[in-house]
Image (spheres, helix red, strand yellow):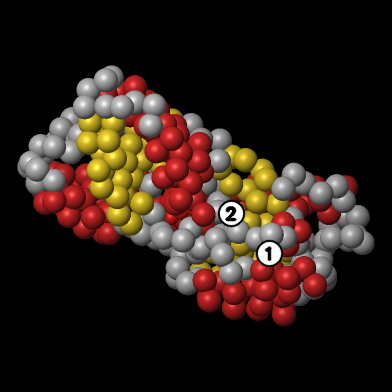
Amino acid sequence: LGGLAAGCDSGDKKGLTVGFSQIGSESGWRAAETKLARQGAEQRGITLKFSDAQQRQENQIKAVRSFIAQGVDAILLAPVVSSGWDEVLGEAKAANIPVILLDRQIDTPNVDLYLTAVTSDTIEEGRVAGRWLAGKVQGRDCRIVEIQGTVGASLVANRKKGFEEAIATAPNLHLVRTQSGEFTRAKGKEVMEGFLKAEAPGSICAVYAHNDDMMIGAIQAIKEAGLKPGTDILTVSIDGVPDIFKAMADGDANATVELAPDMAPRAYDILLAYRKDHAPPPKWVQTPSKLYEPDTAAAEYARRKDLY
Ligand code: AHR
């Protein structure tokens, strides 16, 4: 076996073995990413060794070490947090095993530790959401609450930053509360219940959630408070999972920014090309961030419900 950096062989006469250290299964988007990683591997004749870290970086570090010990040809890593990867990725590098980051970036002074990162522009996702909201409220005063994802993940600071940048151009938009809902439905609901209790009745104009699952939880909390989500409180979130399209089609949600779930198949293709032509891929392979609104929600729901 062995790695792909300088000196890799020129073809894939035998199938590749790839290790994938996945974060967990906190959201519908994450489940879709896992499903497409398995399907994409099968379609390409790749043997996938899958490890679920259950949200813990130490489990991911163990998984990467185990993949190295098993001599996989490459490693996919969806890093739960952004810091603390240099040592273990250094070990992968020393073993000549290329690592591809999926859906989140890491903080490191040494970008040679990974081959490429397949992610969206997570600052831009926040901007897209903020611009949409500014356009929607049209100069009306609007108090916004924000439900953030997992603390310490690269994209959480970025999704916040981009959103704040976009709403800074509209003096009528005020971000009044922000809290982590850990990317889960249950926690999103709990956080929204807290916001509704803390704010004067009827004073929240919009909720921005860093993923759709937390928004689905927030929608539930809004309904239980006797309000109409999508009308009394506007919603904008990120991911594009089937349930948010269903909520939009039902009039309970207003917008989502899609995050492509096929990160692993994109990574496999990069890897296969790299093994063939030895040309290093760009350090960042960007996936699109498209905004969806209720007008296409029913069709998008029908299209996606079995894909995810
Ligand atoms: O890293 C991608 C994020 O992680 C998704 O937006 C969220 O749903 C997931 O848990």
Where does the N terminus fall, quadrant-wise?
bottom right
Residue in view at x 36 percent, y 51 percent: 148
> Could you tell me if residue 133 is visible in this image?
yes
Compared to residue 169, the image places residue 53 above or below, namely below
Given residues 70 and 7, the one toward you in this image is 7
Q: Quadrant of residue 143?
A: top left
In this rendering, would 101 be left or right of 23?
right
Crowd class of label 2 (few under 14; some 14 to 19; many from 20; radius 10 Å): many
Residue 258: percent from the left, percent from the top? 46, 38
Q: Amino acid at mark 1?
A: Ile
Residue 59: percent from the left, percent from the top? 53, 76
Residue in view at x 81 percent, y 68 percent: 96
In this rendering, would 74 be left or right of 60?
right
Residue in view at x 60 percent, y 59 percent: 107
Q: Quadrant of residue 11?
A: bottom right
Q: Which mark is residue 161?
A: none
Instruction: Name the secondary structure under disc 2.
Output: loop
Q: Which residue is mark 1?
A: 75
Instruction: Name the secondary structure under disc 1.
Output: strand
Compared to residue 216, the image places residue 96 above or below, namely below
Q: How far apart in space, not on screen, are marks 1 and 2 (Cα)?
A: 15 Å
Q: Which residue is mark 2?
A: 105
In this rendering, would 57 be left or right of 40?
left
